[in-house]
Amino acid sequence: MADIYTSREDEATVDDVLSKGLKVKAHKWTVLRLALAHSLKIPSQPDEELDRVAERGSEYQLEQVTGQGQGRNPVGQQQDFTDAICGLLSMHLGEDLFRDERAFRRHLQRHIRRGLREFRRGWRDSHDFHQFLYQELCAGVDREAEAGATDFGLLLVNALAEIGVRGEIVETQDGPRITRYQVRLEDPNHLDKVRRGLDKITFALGLQKYGVFPAETGQPKVIGLDVPRPRSTWGSASGADLLEWVRQDQDEPGLMLHPGVDVINHPFAFDLTRQPHLLVGGTTGSGKSICLHTLIISLLVGTPRDKLRLILIDPKKVEFAPYAKAESERIEVITDVVDARERLEALVAEMEIRTSALESAGVRDLTEGRNKGILNLPFIVAFVEELADLIMQEPMAEEHLIRLAQKARATGIHLVIATQRPDARTLNGLLRSNIPSRIALTVQKATESKIILDEIGAERLTGAGDMLIRLSGQPMQRLHGAFVTVDDIAHVIRAERRV
C-alpha cells in the first residue's frame, strides 16, 4: 500500500517542473520534496480536503519521498530524512507526529499536495523556475543582515540636501516592508519642499518605480519618510493573525473589517457601517482578491449569524466559488451576470421596504433600530468582485448599484465593489461620488490612482497587498494586507458549514 497519493493534476505539475522548470533528469520525488519545502514556508495548516484525491495520479512510498530506511550512501552522506521531516511537520502542526505514523503520512501528503498547488498558482512555465524557488524558499533568510546593509539613512540625508533641505534623522521604525525615518527639519517651512521633491528622493535612493511616502509624526518640525526595503526582508501578517484580530473585536458594534497592518505593524480595522460603502481597485497581481477575502473572513468570523447576510457576485466565477461550499443561509454566491442584475434589482426593492420600516419605527438607521430592539433585520453586504465585467455584460446593473450607493446606507445594506480596471468608463462619477471610502492597491498609472483615491500614489506601491486606504472623513493611510491562503479560506468555510 502506498504512503503518499497525488492527483492527475499534481502529476502534470511534477512533469512540468521536471521538463520545463528544473530541466534536468531527476526523480519525481525530487519535485515532491521541493513542494514540501514550499508548503512549510506557509504559516497556515494545509486543508484536510487535500486528503481526498478524486482522480488519482501516482503513488509514492516513504522510501522515495523521505528516504526511509536508506541509511547513508557509499560516501557517508545521510539519505534517510524521515525523522527530520517528521520533526519539521510536528513543529509546524504543534503535535507529536512521531507517535502516529498514519498521521505523519497524512500531513506529509497534505503539505506535498499544497506545495504542488502553489507551484501551479505561482509559477508559469515561461518563467525561470530556479528564480521562483529562490524567491519563495529563501525570502527572509538572513533578514537582519540584509536590512542593515540597506540602511538608507545617510543616503536620505544627502538626498534631502540635493533638494535644498537640511535635516537630521531622529528616529527609525521598522515595519513589515517599510522603514520609517523621522527627520527633523532645520526649517519647518521646508516641509512643502520635501513633499514636492519625493520623486527626486526616490531616484536618489535607487528605488526605481517604488515611492517614498510622507507620514505625519505629530511632532513639530518632524516629518516621517517611509522607505521600502528589499523584498527579501519583507514580513507579512498571516491568516492566523487576521483571525486573532477579528476575535479581539467581536464585541464591537457594527461590521468590523480588518484589511491588514499599518506600515509599523499595528493592526488596522474599521467599521463598514460608518463608511458606508467601499471601493477596492488594483491591477492584476496587486493582491486585490486576497484583500477581498480578508474582508469577507472578517465579516464571517466576527459577525453573529443573525446579524449578517452576504451576497457575493463573481462574474469571473473563480474567486468567490469556494464560499458556495459553506452551504450557509447567510452566504449567497452569484456567478451568472443576469442573476446578479436581478439580485441587485431585488436589493433595491429591499432597500425601499426597509426605508419604510425605518420611518415607521421612527429611527434614523438600522443600527439605531437594532440597538433599541425595534428592528432585528440583518445587515446585508454585497461584494462585486469585478465591476467592469458585470457592467459590460449587464449595463442595467450599474443603475441598481448607483441607487444602492445613494440610499442604502441607512437601511443596513452596504456595497464592497472591486475592479482591476479603474477607469472613468467603469467607475462613473455618480457611482464614485457615493462611495467615499476607497482602497487602492498597486495600479499601473497615476491616472488610475486618481480614479480610485482622487490623488496619485498607488502607482508607486510595492505590490502584493501593499495598499492606500482613504476612509470617509479620515486622512489617507498606507497598509500592508494580511496574506490569506486557500487553506485559511477553507478553514473558515468549514467552520461556517459546521454551525
Image (tube, helix red, strand yellow):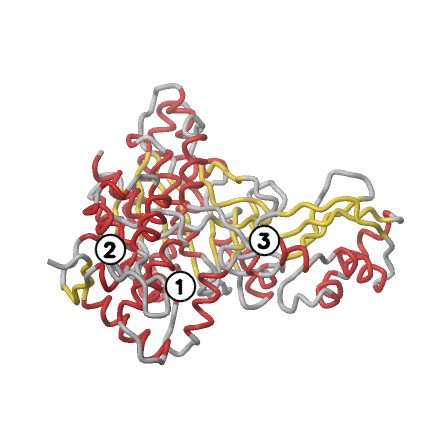
- Earlier sequence position, callout 3 versus callout 1: 3
Give neighbour class at mark 1: few <14, some 14-19, many 20+ (Cα, 10 Å).
many
Give neighbour class at mark 3: few <14, some 14-19, many 20+ (Cα, 10 Å).
many
Residue 187 location (% of width, % of height)? 89, 49
Q: In the shown orientation, is residue 212 left or right of residue 317?
A: right
The kind of residue on which mark 2 rests is Gln
Q: Quadrant of residue 411?
A: top left
Instruction: Specify the quadrant that holds the N terminus.
Output: bottom left
The mark closer to the camera, 1 or 2, is: 2
User: In front: 18, or 152?
Assistant: 18
> CA–CA distance between discs 2 and 3?
33 Å
Label 2: which residue? 109
Label 1: which residue? 388
Residue 453 location (% of width, % of height)? 57, 55
The kind of residue on which mark 1 rests is Ala
> CA–CA distance between discs 3 and 1?
31 Å
User: In front: 361, or 465?
Assistant: 465
The kind of residue on which mark 3 rests is Arg
Q: In the shown orientation, is residue 328 left or right of residue 35?
A: left
Residue 177 numbered tag: 3
- Earlier sequence position, callout 1 versus callout 2: 2
Any part of residue 303 in sight: yes
Determine contact: label 3, label 1, CB under 8 Å: no
Residue 169 location (% of width, % of height)? 79, 49
Name the residue: 44% across, 56% down. 288
Name the secondary structure under disc 2: helix
